[in-house]
Image: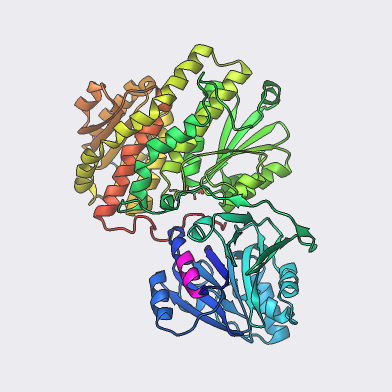
Amino acid sequence: MTMCGIVGYVGNNSAKDMIIDGLKSLEYRGYDSAGIALNAKGKIIVRKESGVIANLEKKIGKQDFDGNLGIGHTRWATHGSPIRENAHPHLSADGRIAIVHNGIIENYLELKAQLKKNHRIEFKSETDSEVIAHLIGAHYKGDLVEAVRKAVERMRGAYAVGAIAADEPDKIVAVRKDAPLIAGIGQDSNYLASDIPALLKYTRDIYLIENDEIVIITADDIKIYDEDMTRVRREVMHVTWDAAAAEKGGYEHFMKKEICEQPEGIRETLERRLDDRGDIKLDGVELTKKELDAIDRIYIVACGTASHAGMQGKALIERFAGIPTETDLASEFRYRNPLVNERTLFLCISQSGETLDTLEALREAKRKGARVLSICNVVGSSVARESDDVFYTWAGPEIAVASTKAYTTQLVCLYLIALYMGRERGVLPESEYRRMIEELRALPQKAEETLKTENQIRELAERFCIKEQIFYIGRGQDVGTAYEASLKLKEVSYINSFAIAAGELKHGTIALIRKQTLFFVLASQDALYEKMLSNIEEIKARSAHVVSIAKKGNRRIAKVSDETIFIPQCADEVAPILAVIPLQLLAYHIAKLKKRNIDKPRNLAKSVTVE
Ligand code: AGP
């Protein structure tokens, strides 16, 4: 099985160069091996290497072979270790068909047993993907499309597959089910890829391939068919991203670049939805009073960082719109028979729009009759396409595995949705609505100001990078921020950290406090300020070291804490957007001092397209 990137090329130029280039553009996804298969004069040549793509490039650079058609792949290991044998492309038994695969073949053990028994096939890798090559090989009678279709009939699971055959040197055949796949339109050349950045240097015109579709790519044509082989007419999608947006733009790491892009991301996400009068436009999403009154419950479902945004969303929707809202982790929601029906609004949050747990939860909610509204950063992603309505974050491409700007723009979307709902339902006083709009409009500039804490944070990171564990506590909306700060630190620095609602400390976790145990205390909520002061006293009494995060002007907290990071004055409701920024910077600087692989931390990948 694989969680990986796919690139394919057919045209008049060097397939080798384009594919290596495309794979490099997908490096950000996280991978541990890479490979390429070319059709060179009717013969399939495969080269693979473990480790970075530069290893593969070095290996094939010296070799005198090329072709005008090929497929390439970056692999992130799950079924089988990250060794060369497990890297894609995989070959059929006679070596005349090669495939690359993104996804998981759930029944691969059963298929493997059948292929061994009926066709005496010897497997060369430990992957689930290799069965696809052999299945296609077993069905191949000179027609690759037909063989791929027959193979797909036997496969269960999620897949985006690209296949080439030695005897058909003019085409790539690809098929998708629940894993991203696009075809790129060039001049005398066409492309296949799992992700848009792989093609940005070559074309901005793409087709999004849908579930159960099969696509045949030749140098001068791209034909898409549904599962019954009826030709599908698809609109061309023109990608408007700036290519530079997918590069580091002078920063040492994508994570740092993306942290610094937050004021802009917040501004974009906000201003595109606010008109001059301060009225919110929901991008054409219809949520009338009648429709809202028909909703008796909202579920916010997501994974990881997006689920922390969801925690804030619950507080905002209940506070502004008065609709009972539950949050759940997508991986839990799917398996607990949730109480969902036609009166449920399912609010799904996903940066990538390809997280399998989130997608499956979305499908489950749809099956049960819920209306699905998604907050997503990737146009045309699976979550976006399968939702009834989408509200996009305008964060721009997020490349670092650790999510930063997607998180803060998800929060902006949640403010807008909650305020819109409250106003539409008539439960939010107009003065309150106006006050919040003013608070939101001030956020980009306040986020800029918050970024100026970086010098202080760098100095803290130098002292604290030797810590073996760090605690984050808060109350109210600060709990979600504590969770997010803790996850960020774990992901990029590999320091053990723990986030907890401050009131819960005394119920057990307080036993862990020793002299100099490090606490980051989030105290951005004026309404809970006194309570947080008591929490600080409680942990200081046990000789812990306390760094507080509070709004400017809160002098008392500075007196009781060992040190304080100040964020600009703002309403409690919007403080989570500002309070998380210094803690993102802290995770980044500690990781940098510890010389971690910041943009691609170990064991992690950008989009988790497996369970
Ligand atoms: C965030 O830093 C993590 N890399 C991870 O928790 C992520 O937020 C999660 O996997 C969900 O991803 P999504 O937003 O793309 O669905």
Q: Is residue 2 visible?
A: no
The image position of residue 588, as x and y in percent, is 31, 48
**Quarter of the figure with the C terminus:** bottom right
Residue under the image location 74 percent in, 81 percent down: 142
The image position of residue 321, as x and y in percent, is 57, 22
The image position of residue 416, as x and y in percent, is 52, 28
Residue under the image location 65 percent in, 65 percent down: 106
- Count the numbered circles shown: 0
Asked if 417 appears above or below 164 in the picture, the reply is: above
Which residue is nearer to you in this view: 93 or 112?
93
On the rendered structure, is 545 left or right of 25?
left
Whether the magenta-drawn stretch holds residue 345 is answered as no
Asked if 109 appears above or below 570 in the picture, the reply is: below
Coloured how?
Answer: rainbow
- SS majority, magenta: helix
Which residue is nearer to you in this view: 138 or 204?
204
On the rendered structure, is 568 left or right of 121?
left
Q: Is residue 562 visible?
A: yes
Which residue is nearer to you in this view: 102 or 474?
102
On the rendered structure, is 526 left or right of 129?
left
On the rendered structure, is 109 left or right of 240?
right
**Quarter of the figure with the N terminus:** bottom right
- Write down the quadrant of residue 599 in the picture: bottom left
Q: In the orientation shown, which residue stands out farthest toward the front?
A: 187
Residue under the image location 46 percent in, 42 percent down: 395
Asked if 254 appears above or below 17 in the picture, the reply is: above
Which residue is nearer to you in this view: 423 or 79?
423
- Write down the quadrant of residue 339 in the picture: top right
Residue under the image location 38 percent in, 71 percent down: 54
The image position of residue 126, as x and y in percent, is 55, 76
Q: Over which residues does the magenta segment extend?
A: 16-22
